[in-house]
Structure formats: C-alpha cells, structure tokens
C-alpha cells in the first residue's frame, strides 16, 4: 500500500537582505556579537506590502514551477502553519485555497516554530485515514512584522520566508517513519505575544510584540532537541548512525551544534542555513530541505531527521525516508 511522504516542495524568501551591519546602524549591537551567539549573518525582510499570504503564494508558485500544476491536483486540504497570519480570521490557508482555485478544506495551525512539523503529522494522518488524498502543508512567516525593533535580544534573530509541501502517497519503503509531537505549556511565558487576552492564565502580562526569554528558551531547546530526536529515531526503528540528513530548526547555530554533537553526527550530515536566513520559524525546515535538495545533498532512500522547538513551549520531530 506504500507510505506517505513529501511529493513536491517549493520555497520563497523575500529579496530584501538585512545584514548584521544594517543592525549595527540602528541599534547597540555588533556583527561579532550576533555571529558568535547565533551564527546569523543576514536575514530576509518582507516589503511593506508583503504578508504571510503573499509569501505562502510565492512558495506555492515555486512548487508549481518545479513540479507542475498537476502537483496540486487531489490536494483536499490546505494547512498554513504560521505565527503571523494575515488576520485572525479568515485563515491564511483559505487565501491560498482561493488563490490556486483548489477544491479543498483550509485552516491555519498555530504551534509556534514547530507548526510545520505539526502540519506534516496532520497531513500524514489525514492521508492515512483517507480523509484527504493529498495535503498542501505550508510554513510561512512575516516575523519582521511582529518583531520588537527596540529589543536587540530578539530583533536580530528573526527573518521572513515560506515553504510549501504536498504530502501524499509514495511507493513502499519511502515516506514518514515516525512523528514525535510535544508541548510544555508551563513554559508559555518564555516566548509569547498578545492576541485577544492581555495576560496568560498565570497572570503574566502579554506584550503586543514578540517577547522571548532567550536564555530559558535556549536551555529548553538544547534539551528537547536531544530527547525528541532520539525518540523519533527509536520510533522509526533506527539508530542515530542511520540518519544521513539532519534538518534541525534553524534558530541558532549553537543549539544546532549541541543537537548534532549529542547525536554523534558529522557536520556533513547537518543542513545549516541559519547564517543566511536567521530564524524563519515555521518556514525554517522546508527552506532548509529545499536547499539541501537543490545542492544534491539528499539521495534516494536517505533517512532525513527533522526537529523543531518554539513557543508554547512546543516541539516536533520526525524521520522521513526520501
Ligand atoms: N547585541 C549585543 N548585545 C546583546 C544583544 C545584541 N543583539 N542581545 C542581547 N545582548 C546582551 C544582553 O543584553 C546581555 O547583556 P547583559 O549581560 O549586560 O544583560 C548579554 O548580551 C548576554 O545576553 P544573553 O541573553 O545571556 O546571551 P545569550 O548568550 O544567551 O544569547 C540568545 C542570547 C542568542 C537570544 C540566546 O539565548 C538564544 O539563542 N536563545 C534561544 C533563542 C531561540 O532559538 N528562539 C527560538 C524560538 S522559536 C519561536 O517559536 C520563535
């Protein structure tokens, strides 16, 4: 009966580049500080009239350019994982559905940076159950629109971008082998932004712009990157040595390095582009996957390990045979 995997992929990053030097000009920071703490050298920033829907449209256009319009046929569901939807409602996914004239259900998925990891699991389950033949699973973010440009400890970290994947049936032996989804809402206050309520249930006030306790999130990230990857590998019936391609969430090079080291993987197996895009949240893994494919780094039958962490706090990991 075969497996369920990624049939087609496309990405988009806005053309406007913002370098660390550009930050030096507007706040008290330095290229040396940003590179040594995060590995980030530059990131992409959407223009004033580009929003998450626009970025998502472009990623799907790229998918169509690469794989043909027929790649979208039988897509019965559109999921847009994002922390920066154009509007609270309608769902940004409905805007994508309309733009491409799909006969599909559509909803947004809000799970912090792991949103696309959660969307892949949902897509898998929808196809597996027969509720959808294919699912268009998008991660898209206009994070620069919610960044606190007065907070140097967060402003330098984020970037804008989008990735779109069609999930569906693949031949036997290929496809997703495991998923791990997790959350620890006790860490809610470490990474937050207000929407409707002015405060969290525990009374912590919510800011109108993205707030992050970097040090706490860092510790959490190193911990779950380790536990979630090992769990996903074990569930897939594999060992770390079987992982040919590791695609971690691109948030911080030191966090990626810690995860890499714990798994005992050489750098050649790790996909890194955080230096060029910063943290694009839900878009980070699909962009890294497409770039690894374009660079010829993924061979038929390779085991790809995904892992991501973020606001919630939440995490997601999975193993995919390509
Ligand atoms: N330039 C210069 N100095 C800075 C900057 C900056 N851009 N930002 C902070 N500093 C200062 C701080 O004010 C602090 O100064 P102080 O000691 O005088 O108070 C000093 O640098 C050290 O700050 P730390 O927070 O200890 O620096 P740290 O080494 O922890 O690095 C960082 C901070 C990069 C934010 C790190 O904690 C981190 O990467 N955390 C995880 C972030 C992350 O990956 N988030 C993803 C979340 S996913 C999602 O859902 C969005």
Image (cartoon, rainbow, N blue to C red):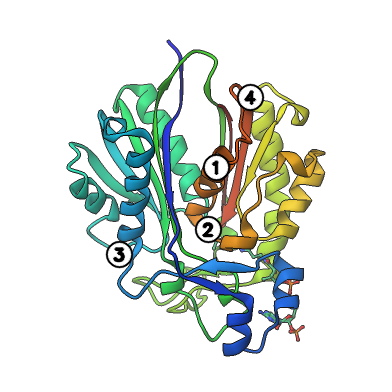
Residue occupying the point 63% across, 24% down:
236
Q: Position of residue 238 (x, y in %)?
A: 70, 23
| Mark 4, residue position | 236
Q: Please, what secondary structure does the residue beneath circle 1 have?
A: helix
Task: Give the mark, 3 or 1, whose residue is nearer the N terminus.
Answer: 3
Foreground mark, 4 or 2, reads: 4
Residue drawn 36% across and 34% down? 67
Q: Earlier in the sequence, mark 3 or mark 2?
A: 3
Label 4 crowd bin: few (<14), some (14–19), many (20+), radius 10 Å: some
Label 1 crowd (10 A; few <14 / some 14-19 / many >=20): many
For this view, does 200 lie left or right of residue 107? right
Mark 2 CB lies closer than 8 A to ligand 1 = yes
Q: Is residue 150 above or below residue 229?
A: below
**Disc 4 versus disc 1: nearer the observer:** 1
Q: Which of the pair 239/22 is nearer the observer? A: 22
Q: In terms of secondary structure, where does tag 3 sit? A: loop
Q: Secondary structure at mark 4?
A: loop
Name which of mark 4 and mark 3 comes first in the sequence.
Answer: 3
Query: Where residue 31 appears, x then y in whole percent?
Result: 70, 77
Which residue carries the number 3 mark? Answer: 86
Q: Crowdedness of circle 2 by 10 Å Cα count: few (<14), some, many (20+)?
A: many
The residue identified by callout 2 is 312
Q: Point out the tag, 2 or 1, that comes first from the N-terminus.
A: 1
Give the quadrant of the N terminus: top left
Q: Is residue 271 left or right of residue 61?
A: right
| Residue 234 % position (x, y) | 69, 27
- Name the one closer to the observer, 308 or 13: 13
Label 3 environment density (alpha carbons within 10 Å; few <14, some 14–19, many ≥20): some
How far, Cα to Cα, is label 2 from label 1? 24 Å
Is disc 4 in contact with disc 1, using a CB cutoff of under 8 Å? no
């Amino acid at each position: 009966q075969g497996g369920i995997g990624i049939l087609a992929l496309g990405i988009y990053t806005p053309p406007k580049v913002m370098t660390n030097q550009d930050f030096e000009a507007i706040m008290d920071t330095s290229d040396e500080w940003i590179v040594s703490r995060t590995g980030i050298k530059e990131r992409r920033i959407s223009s004033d009239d580009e929003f998450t829907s626009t970025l998502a449209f472009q990623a799907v256009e790229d998918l169509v350019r690469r794989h043909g319009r027929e790649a979208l046929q039988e897509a019965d569901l559109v999921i847009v994982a994002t922390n920066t939807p154009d509007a609270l409602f309608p769902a940004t996914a409905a805007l994508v559905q309309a733009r491409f004239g799909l006969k599909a259900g559509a909803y947004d998925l809000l799970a912090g940076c792991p949103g696309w990891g959660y969307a892949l699991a949902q897509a898998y389950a929808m196809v597996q159950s027969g509720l959808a033949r294919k699912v268009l699973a998008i991660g898209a973010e206009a994070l620069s629109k919610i960044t606190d440009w007065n907070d140097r400890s967060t402003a330098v970290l984020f970037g804008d971008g989008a990735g779109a994947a069609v999930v569906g049936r693949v031949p036997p032996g290929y496809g997703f082998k495991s998923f791990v989804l997790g959350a620890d809402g006790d860490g809610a206050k470490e990474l937050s932004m207000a929407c409707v309520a002015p405060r969290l249930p525990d009374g912590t006030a919510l800011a109108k712009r993205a707030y992050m306790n970097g040090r706490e999130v860092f510790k959490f990230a190193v911990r779950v990157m380790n536990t979630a990857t090992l769990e996903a590998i074990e569930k897939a019936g594999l060992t770390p040595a079987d992982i040919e391609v590791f695609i971690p969430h691109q948030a911080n090079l030191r966090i990626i390095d810690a995860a890499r080291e714990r798994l005992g993987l050489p750098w050649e197996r790790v996909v890194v582009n955080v230096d060029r895009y910063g943290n694009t949240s839900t878009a980070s893994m699909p962009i890294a996957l497409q770039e690894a494919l374009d660079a010829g780094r993924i061979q038929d039958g390779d085991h790809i390990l995904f892992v991501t962490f973020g606001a919630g706090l939440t995490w997601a990991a999975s193993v995919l045979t390509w």
